[in-house]
């Protein structure tokens, strides 16, 4: 069971059924004991896939369509509409022929423009709770052990007085890499979070990378984005597109924050579909008066203090095509994963330090679960302000007002704050100018 933001007044509820009868639905309401409203899971939104949809079937390192495959079932999606702001709703899913889920609850989005606190990270994965072995690329086939600490720490925030309202997970989601059972395991492990808090994802190399993908690799084990899009259909331009035509980049608003989840695994250079979409969204659909904070997430970093050529090639590519838009539209933050550690920059543009208040700040947040990197440059970059390669965890971002946003790196081991920064909104001048123009009209 997991949820996602659909709009300021609606939420998606998603769940898997192995078989589907005639009336799968969400039963919901504002009282746990009175779920009087019903929203059908439209037959248009039932999605499944089989081994023929997966890639590199005869290629290197591709278990997805062979030994790693089994049928995950049917993904059912229901959009709960007409929600009142900041209201707790209870729900359960199912149908008479298949039975029903337990009752869960979520809090609806606040009014547009409201302060909001949320969680962000990349590269989490999961691991067997009993310590047994499974296929994984880390920890000697014991899975992403650090993820268990992160999941536990975030789960403890559910239903607290100061609970974060949504979660961003930008790439390298389950690390199933072709073994479908590990997707089941991952979704089960995050359910205590995702059933109660919108779980907003972006795609990474371990979901998408095959020999025919834009960033050619065998990193997904032949998945080529299909299981990812199955579980997170909202994280794309259209959840009805054929599997291999899905465009996994999107934008959503929540309170005073506008988030763009982009894909580093698809072309984002001049005249690409993704870049054209991004330009149009920034020009036409971002209201800085309502959402003064604009954030980009991309799995591979635009800025990362690494001496690996693969990191640097992608960074320079993103700086060429995406960074100019960040500067023109005064995007506040760039959030990334891929590099398995925590890093923070000062304000930076074109690879050079910039005075405070004149450029975005960039964070690498790839420390949520995968084995932490030991890759440390001999000579740190001048814009690299803070680095941590010892602790698993996640970031909490707190947009307190239109002018102030606080970012804390939380140690998942003991919930302590390892690094903290308060960012001032350098787009405020632009926002003020727009308000003035409206008054003149």
Image (cartoon, helix red, strand yellow):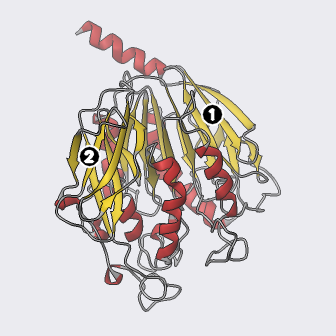
Q: Residue at x 62, y 60 (%)?
A: 312
Q: Is residue 265 above or below residue 332?
A: below
Q: Position of residue 118 (x, y in %)?
A: 53, 36
Q: Position of residue 147 (x, y in %)?
A: 64, 58
Compared across the picture, whether 321 is left or right of 411 comes to left
The extreme right residue here reads 378
Mark 1: which secondary structure?
Answer: strand
Q: Is residue 301 above or below residue 64?
A: above
Q: CA distance from mark 2 to mark 1?
A: 31 Å
- Tag shown at residue 395: none
Q: Residue at x 69, y 71 (%)?
A: 138
Q: Which residue is mark 1?
A: 407
Tell me where residue 384 sits by quadrant.
Answer: top right
Tell me where residue 45 sits by quadrant.
Answer: bottom left
Q: Quadrant of the C terminus?
A: top left
Q: Nearer the viewer, residue 384 or 115?
A: 115
Q: Position of residue 389 (x, y in %)?
A: 77, 53
Pointer 1 local density, CA inside 10 Å: few below 14, some 14–19, many at least 20: many
Q: Which residue is mark 2?
A: 79
Compared across the picture, whether 176 is left or right of 38 comes to right
Q: Nearer the viewer, residue 415 or 343?
A: 415
Q: Residue at x 61, y 49 (%)?
A: 303
Q: Position of residue 180 (x, y in %)?
A: 46, 75
* Residue 108 visible in rendering: no
């Amino acid at each position: 069971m997991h949820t996602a933001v659909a709009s300021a007044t609606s939420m998606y509820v998603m769940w898997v059924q192995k078989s589907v009868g005639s009336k799968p639905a969400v039963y919901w309401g504002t009282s746990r004991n009175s779920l009087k409203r019903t929203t059908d899971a439209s037959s248009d939104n039932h999605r499944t896939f089989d081994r023929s949809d997966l890639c590199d079937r005869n290629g290197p390192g591709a278990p997805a369509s062979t030994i790693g495959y089994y049928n995950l079932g049917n993904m059912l999606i229901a959009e709960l509409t007409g929600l009142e702001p900041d209201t707790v709703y209870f729900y359960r899913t199912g149908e008479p022929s298949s039975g029903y889920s337990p009752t869960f609850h979520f809090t609806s989005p606040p009014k547009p423009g409201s302060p909001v606190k949320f969680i962000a990270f990349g590269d989490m994965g999961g691991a067997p709770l009993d310590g047994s072995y499974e296929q994984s690329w880390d920890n000697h086939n014991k899975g992403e052990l650090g993820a268990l600490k992160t999941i536990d720490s975030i789960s403890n925030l559910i239903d607290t007085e100061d609970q974060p309202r949504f979660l961003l997970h930008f790439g390298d989601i389950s690390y199933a890499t072709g073994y479908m059972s590990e997707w089941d395991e991952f979704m089960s492990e995050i359910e205590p979070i995702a059933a109660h808090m919108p779980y907003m994802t972006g795609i990474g190399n371990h979901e998408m990378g095959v020999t025919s993908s834009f960033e050619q690799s065998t990193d997904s084990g032949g998945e080529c984005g299909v299981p990812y899009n199955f579980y997170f259909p909202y994280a794309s331009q259209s959840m009805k597109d054929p599997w291999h035509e899905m465009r996994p980049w999107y934008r959503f608003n929540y309170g005073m924050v506008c988030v763009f989840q982009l894909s580093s695994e698809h072309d984002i250079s001049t005249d690409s579909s993704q870049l054209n979409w991004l330009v149009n969204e920034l020009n036409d659909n971002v209201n800085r008066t309502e959402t003064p904070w604009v954030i980009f997430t991309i799995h591979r970093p635009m800025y990362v203090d690494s001496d690996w050529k693969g990191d640097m090639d992608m960074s320079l590519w993103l700086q060429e095509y995406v960074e100019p838009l960040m500067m023109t539209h005064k995007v506040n933050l760039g959030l990334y994963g891929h590099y398995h550690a925590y890093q923070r920059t000062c304000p930076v543009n074109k690879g050079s330090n910039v005075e405070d208040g004149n450029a975005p700040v960039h964070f690498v947040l790839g420390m949520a679960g995968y084995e932490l990197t030991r890759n440390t440059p001999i000579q740190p970059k001048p814009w690299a302000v803070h680095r941590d390669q010892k602790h698993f965890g996640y970031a909490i971002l707190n947009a307190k007002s239109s002018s102030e946003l606080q970012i804390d790196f939380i140690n998942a081991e003991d919930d302590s704050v390892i690094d903290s920064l308060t960012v001032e909104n350098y787009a405020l001048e632009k926002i003020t100018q727009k308000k003035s123009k409206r008054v003149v009209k």
